[in-house]
Amino acid sequence: MSGTQHLPAAPETVDAVLLADGWHKVARGSFTVGPLGFHAAIVRPRSFRPGHRYPVLVHVYGGPTSQMAKADPWGYLLDQWIADHGFIVFAMDGRGTPGRGRAWERVIKGNLIDLQLDDQVAGLQAAGARYPELDLARAGMFGWSFGGYFSAMAAMRRPDVFKAAVAGAPVCDWQDYDTHYSERYLGLPQQNPEGYRKSSVLTYCAELKVPLLIVHGTADDNVYFMHSLKMADSLFRAGRPYEFLVLPGFTHMVPDAVVQRSLQERILGFFAAHLQP
């Protein structure tokens, strides 16, 4: 699926994946949405009731090199587990993500958040207009790494849309991240200071008005733990409330099954507390 044409919604797809305890069904609908034909997917509860409205969780990455809406049932297992607890999970790939051509990816050069955040909002609102079961008054966002950065930005900059967010292993300031990545998209800090300022979470911490849960491993060797510490310090100095879940000894991934389950249950409980009726 390429180009920008707006296609009608595809029928719900039910995939089955084999896990240790048997076959699991993943029910999802894939479609294009919004004025630019963003690729998107919706995962509904397996107990979905037509006519019922559900809080919406946007599972985001939003950055270069990675897609969220893919024809891969394994990629929706966590989303299905979350949805089965009374949510609808929405995922979308805006501009800057791969697979849509050179111009689509390069349009974000110089600023890593403004256009992408606008795309996520436009895509979510278009999906809500098409599918009335999405209760956009109860929308949250969660993601990891670039998705964690994106979630923190969404909470701070668009509290009118996102009423709670979970930021997992977030980059907070691109000047503190690998230069081979940051400078590829933002250029040199001396040549693009405004782009770095606008793309930094620290610029907006004082504007946080909705619940935010920050999650980070202390031994993260990709996005250093320092990033979340800087965010926490900025939020604290600005008098903004937040929650901080520290994962002692973990790096950028969480391979321990027990810890991973506890982490997802904590995230689910956070959203249930703030978005469920």
Image (spheres, helix red, strand yellow):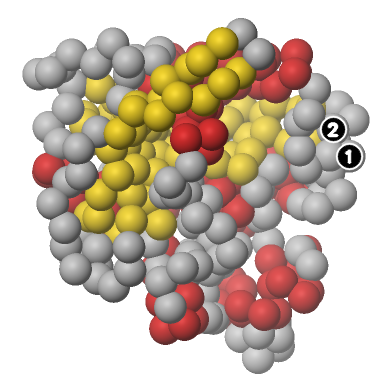
Instruction: Give the mark, 1 or 2, whose residue is nearer the N terminus.
Output: 1
Q: Left or right of 220: which side holds 45?
A: left
Up-down: is 161 above or below 120?
Answer: above
The amino acid type found where label 2 is placed reads Phe
Question: Amino acid type of disc 1?
Answer: Ala
User: On the picture, is 65 further left or further right than 277?
Assistant: right
Residue at disc 2, secondary structure: loop
- Residue 276, given in percent of the width and then of the height, sits at 33, 16
Q: Position of residue 130 (x, y in %)?
A: 12, 43
Q: How many marks?
A: 2
| Residue at (43, 46) in percent of width and height | 71
Residue 162 in view here: no
Q: 5 and 244: which one is in front? A: 5
Residue at the image position 12 percent from the left and 43 percent from the top: 129
**Relative to 169, is 133 on the left or the right?**
left
In the image, which disc is placed on residue 219?
A: 1
Q: Residues within 10 Å of mark 2 (few under 14, many from 20)?
A: some
For the point 62% across and 79% down, the residue is: 186
Depicted 132 relative to depicted 232: above or below: above
**x and y percentages locating residue 219 in the rendered image:** 89, 39
Relative to 101, does residue 190 appear above or below in the rendering? below
Q: Find disc 2 in the rendering and name its residue.
A: 250
Question: For this rendering, which residue is in front, 203 or 251?
Answer: 251
Q: Which residue does the image show at 58% across and 31% down from the upper left?
A: 213
Q: Position of residue 245 (x, y in %)?
A: 70, 26
Q: Are marks 1 and 2 in contact (CB under 8 Å)?
A: yes
State the residue in front, 268 or 5. Answer: 5
Residue density around tag 1, few if under 14, some if 14–19, many if 20 or more, within 10 Å: some
